[in-house]
Image (tube, coloured by chain):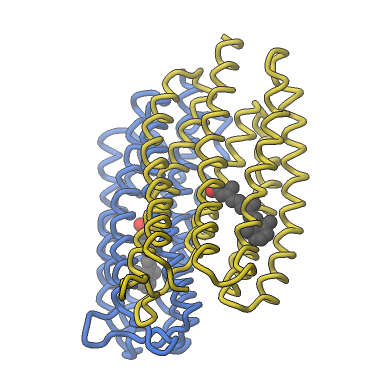
Chain colours: A yellow, B blue
Amino acid sequence: VQLTAGQYTTGSLILMVSYGAHFAFILFFLMMSLQLAPRYRIVPVLSAVVMASAGLSLLREFSLWQASYELVDGIYRPLAENQSFTNAFRYGNWTITVPILLTQLAIAFGISRPDLHKRVLRMIVPALLMIWTGLYGQFGETGDWSRLNLWGVISTVFFVWLIVEVRGVITLGVANSPAELKGWPKNIWWYFLATWGLYPIGYALPQLGFTGDVVVVRQLLFSIADISSKLIYGIILSRYVLRRSALEG
Amino acid sequence: VQLTAGQYTTGSLILMVSYGAHFAFILFFLMMSLQLAPRYRIVPVLSAVVMASAGLSLLREFSLWQASYELVDGIYRPLAENQSFTNAFRYGNWTITVPILLTQLAIAFGISRPDLHKRVLRMIVPALLMIWTGLYGQFGETGDWSRLNLWGVISTVFFVWLIVEVRGVITLGVANSPAELKGWPKNIWWYFLATWGLYPIGYALPQLGFTGDVVVVRQLLFSIADISSKLIYGIILSRYVLRRSALEG
Ligand SMILES: CC1=C(/C=C/C(C)=C/C=C/C(C)=C/C=O)C(C)(C)CCC1
Ligand SMILES: CC1=C(/C=C/C(C)=C/C=C/C(C)=C/C=O)C(C)(C)CCC1
């Protein structure tokens, strides 16, 4: 797809803001961890790890964006002779970050040892199957809609399974939370559905047509999803465990 | 070997996930060390060093992958005039990381001073001989099977010697562990065999033929081995010394 100068710059800008935000918040989460009771410190530390990992992946997407287009007569043309732009790196990165985000949730809700391992495993299995089937399907985004849709549906089945497991952890979270904080897990549940739900929309988007606007809107959607499901999510969980630390003394 | 676009992207993706994961976990191990009794802090700190070193080496492999192929008519062709892709950097990196991983093991198991130095030295000597004979042999991977196999066998002899030494350290670890944790060294022993055992498989793989799939599967195998034998191994050892710190007060 050819991009206008405006579209090309907007795309670069979105990716730049995303990687910048993720890298910068490493510092926030590291310092945050020092404020907490030792048992909860791991929650913001894991957010810092997620920030670093996602930041590197988004920096890679940014470089790839820069390397994939060439300015000819005021239009940015894809450099076919060179490598071409792909979102596949994002899926690779989710393989690291998604298991960490789910582990964080179970630790923040104070689920303890043997049960913790079981619950985390039961969330990670459908999550990885969802990501890898989606990765396989996304190679169809260049026009093979039956591949994109078939694997998208398979991936969605795993997503539904994951949602059921997360719901179970939320229920435990409500049970474990001090009385003043019982509202938090419920709100986190809705937040989880709203933010993770953006990814399948981004996945399906290319079917709207091969236009520059679709390419750019897709980056925007993925970036909003990334910042919400990792960065803001990390802040919410950190504040929740900060309150818990204070209440539990 | 020529690669399809799917194979090329999958290879880049595997290398990107590996270097991203290693870099991101530097933060985890540094913060983890603050939670421990002072005598065990060095264990996660060494993991952080291994993460940095392996991350840099994998970033190098990633750049080399990008620089070694050229997209011509939808196929990624090796750029013969330029440098070609090699796994040799991995062996260089092992020269740094393997001695650290072995030292970590002996420290985590609470082996103390004069005996510690002796045990560590007895593991490092066969380990380095294993790596350097393997490095010499791997230059035969472009088709000189007798070189690959001869030096592979010599390297395996050193690997067996190393396994014997590690077994000795595990036995000391069982003896030194508090009663509640005696199961850990035994499990670490099996984990060590399973994860280090992946490397010779990756070494021998080119003999299955010069196909794009073999090239990509090999990167996948090495990356799984790297993440297991360094990153997850580091998490396991850190958790073991965290428990020891708590029990020993
Ligand atoms: C349902 C569905 C998908 C869901 C993806 C999700 C839910 C991704 C979440 C990613 C996160 C939270 C990353 C944070 O680092 C795919 C794979 C796009 C494929 C199409 C169907
Ligand atoms: C037996 C054998 C090998 C073993 C390699 C091993 C066991 C490497 C371990 C590396 C680690 C743990 C790196 C971590 O950074 C070689 C050299 C491939 C050559 C073929 C025979």
**Total numbered badges shown on the rendered structure:** 0
Residue that extends furthest to the front in the rendered view of this protein: A73
Q: Is residue A69 above or below residue A102?
A: below
Q: In this view, does A92 lie above or below B188?
A: below
Ligand 2 shown in quarter: bottom left
Q: Residue at x 51, y 18 (%)?
A: A37
Q: Which residue is drawn at 33% across and 80% down?
A: B69
Q: Is residue A137 at least partly visible in the picture?
A: yes
The residue nearer to you, when weighing A7 against B34, is A7
Q: In which quarter of the image is residue A142?
A: bottom right
Q: Is residue A129 at least partly visible in the picture?
A: no
Q: Where is residue A177 in the image (x, y as percent from the top left)?
A: 70, 20
Q: Position of residue A151 (x, y in %)?
A: 69, 69
The residue nearer to you, when weighing A68 against B88, is A68
Q: Which residue is drawn at 40% across and 29% down?
A: A28
The residue nearer to you, when weighing A90 against A197, is A197
Q: In this view, does A2 lie above or below A104?
A: below
Q: Position of residue A146 (x, y in %)?
A: 70, 77
Name the quadrant of the C terminus of chain A.
Answer: top right
Q: Quadrant of residue B180?
A: top right
Q: Quadrant of residue A246?
A: top right
Q: Residue at x 34, y 90 (%)?
A: B143
The residue nearer to you, when weighing A97 against B152, is A97
Q: Where is residue A136 in the image (x, y as percent from the top left)?
A: 61, 70
